[in-house]
Structure formats: structure tokens, C-alpha cells
Amino acid sequence: MTIAPLDDLTGFDALVVSPGVPINTHPIAAKARAAGVPIIGDIELFAEARSALPPHKVVGITGTNGKSTTTALVHHMLQTAGVPSLMGGNIGAPILGERPLPEGGVYVLELSSYQIDLTFSLDCDVAVLLNVTPDHLDRYEGFEAYRASKLRLLDMQSSEHVAVVASEDNGVGPAVRSMTTGAELTQWFGGNYATDFAAEQSEWPALQGPHNAQNAWSARVACLALDLSHDVIDAGLRTYTGLPHRMERVGTYDGVTFVDDSKATNPESAAPALAAFPRVHWIVGGKAKGDDLDACLPHLGNVIAAYTIGEAGPVFARVLAPHVAVHEAGTLAEAVRLAAAAAQRGEVVLLSPAAASFDQFTDYAARGRAFREAVEGLR
């Protein structure tokens, strides 16, 4: 069967594309704009279908780093409370592939900037903006355009709904906005996450490090906005088990702990992992999103040695050489072998690549699985 090219979109109601389609450069996007046809994604289809669903609420979570953890944590807290909920968007199964929730359910959506770009009517009952640092700049004209994309999640909200802004680096926060429940929410706001949560965080095994203090604060405030009790929220923090490939402990051999943080695909997301452990053998590299590791440099005092891999290996080796011992391993398997041979009891071998995986793996999950396999091969 021959499929005719979409040369003329005149008369189409909309062009629905995957978030991965670069609408800034793809020819089909230009044709849609020329025909005056809106370009939307699956989240917009969900938003347009909400009126036909049983009464429910939506939590939308965006930011450069921490989206997946915060989304999964909010979902876990809702499950702990016995509230029907689904997790989707940029995590798990596509939301349109799920069965509708019963009345009183909550849809918890992780939203990338690409998804927000394709969404125009999603009025989240609770919107969470975690942080905004440079990323995906091949898709945007610059950082301000990327930041504006994230902020649109808040712009789409009705004024009576709750916006939780967790960081000062996005130009609008931190803050909690709500016309109806702001007074209750703001009791959790203000101060330093790491200091305020220091005692409590020791009881949250899957939420270590200063970045997870921010994630936990954001999830906590979001769930307060959903009328969950403090006791349920605290129980959720204690029992949350974490996500695969995000600071996931995959084994301990001869007193050395091996941690899979393959989801850290930029320096800003790798930095918190380095901060979380005092003596680290760091496996770093892949397909870089830039030539620097500036966000990681303040934490190199925790790094005993770095083991560079992938396409970015030589560049990262040059950046790190003035600061720490560097071994240009090339492959992940070789990096694991070298790091395991050097590490001493009480130290951590950390895969936190600060780069994408597409030079050597199909995605970050495949890279994480390869790390686990290499670690299990040490037995």
C-alpha cells in the first residue's frame, strides 16, 4: 500500500505528533502552520477529553531535573492514601492508553517541555515546577525560550488552582500560589530544603541528597493541596522505593556499593548524585549535551577517581584531569572493571553519566541494565 505524502493539510482539525518530533525544524510542522492547523500532542488530547471523564484531578509536574522522582513520589503517596491514581505522560505508559479512573481519582503527569509545547488547554489542579537549567537547547532558540516552555504549565492554570514552584532558578519562585488553600500550603514553604529536612531525610532511604530534599518538599506540598494528611505523606516518604536507574543501588560487593544513576543525562542531574556520597568512583560520559561539567565541579571533592566512557570521554577527561585522577575507560564494562578493582570498602562506584546514552546504547535504561550486568559479573 502506498501512503500519499501529507503535502496539503488544509481542512485538518489538528496534526497530532509525538513529543520527539522536532516541531522547530520538521517539514510537516511547517506545512501545518502554513495551513493554519494546530500542532498538538497526546496530553492535549487528554486535556480536551477531561470533561467526559468521571470527576477527577490532575497533577502536572515539570522541570529540568527531578520530574520522574517527584511524579512517582506523588503517585506513591496517593496509593498509600488509597486514592485511585494513574501515573503517565513522560513516565510509564502513555496516559491515553490507560482506562479512565473512577470518580475522585488523580492523574499524575510528568511533563517534558516538548509535551508542554504541544499542549494548550491542560488546566492542572496542581502544577509543580521544580527547577529550570539549560537543556535541550538544540530545540529552542536559547535558554529563555526553554524556560518559557516550562512556565506555560503554570500559565494554563485557572487562578483558583495550586502552583508549586520549588526553585529560584526559573525566575518566578520559589512560591506556592493558591487563592483558596495557600495559607495551609505555605506552612511547608521557606528555608533551606537540606537543613529543614535533614533529620527526616535520614528516614527516607530512596530519597537521599539535596536534590531529593527539593523533590520531597514539592511532592509533599502537592499532596497537601490534594488534601492528603501529614501522616499519610510522611508514610509515603518513608516507604517510597525509588525509580530504576535513578540513584538505584544495584549491589554491594566486598563493602563497595554500586549505584545506577543512568538517568542523569546532563551535568545538573549528575551533580546531586556526586553530592550524596562522600567517596565516589565516578563513571561519566556518553553523548554530551555540552562540553562542560560545570555543575559537577563543586562536588569533585567527593570523587576519588573518574572513569570516562563514550563519545564525550576524551572531552570530559580533559575537563576533569586538573581536579581528579582520570581513567579513559572507553566502554562501560571496562569502567566498571577498573572502578571495582580500585574501590575500597565503604566507597561507591557511581554511574552518573552527565550525558545522553545514544552513542553506545538505545536509551538510558539500556545503559543502566548494562551497568547492572557488569556489576553482577563481578561476583
Image: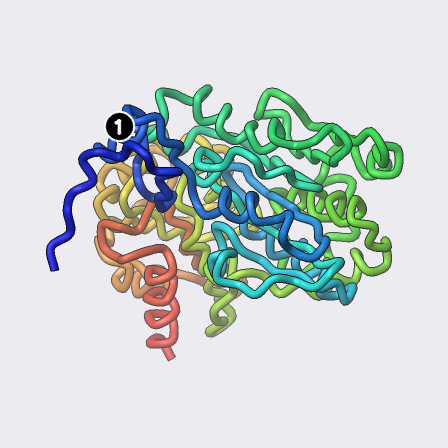
**For the N terminus, which image quadrant?**
bottom left
Residue 208 point in image, percent of width and height: 63, 53
Residue 306 point in image, percent of width and height: 36, 48
Q: Can the viewer see residue 220 in this picture?
A: yes
Q: Residues within 10 Å of mark 1 (few under 14, many from 20)?
A: some
At horizontal 53% and vertical 63% (from top left) the residue drawn is: 98
Q: Quadrant of residue 60?
A: top right
Nearer-the-camera pick, 88 or 215: 88
Q: Give the secondary structure at mark 1.
A: helix
* Left or right for 330, reference 365: left
Q: Which residue is mark 1?
A: 30
Residue projecting furthest to the bottom = 379
At horizontal 63% and vertical 25% (from top left) the residue drawn is: 168
Residue projecting furthest to the left = 2
Q: Give the answer, above or below, for where 133 lies relative to 126.
A: above
* Left or right for 267, reference 223: left
At horizontal 65% and vertical 58% (from top left) the residue drawn is: 75
At horizontal 43% and vertical 29% (from top left) the residue drawn is: 134
Residue 378 point in image, percent of width and height: 35, 75
Q: Quadrant of residue 365?
A: bottom left
Q: Can the viewer see residue 291 in this picture?
A: no
**Model colouring:** rainbow
At label 1, the amino acid type is Ala
Q: Give the answer, above or below, for where 24 lies relative to 198.
A: above
Residue 50 point in image, percent of width and height: 61, 48
Nearer-the-camera pick, 298 or 64: 64
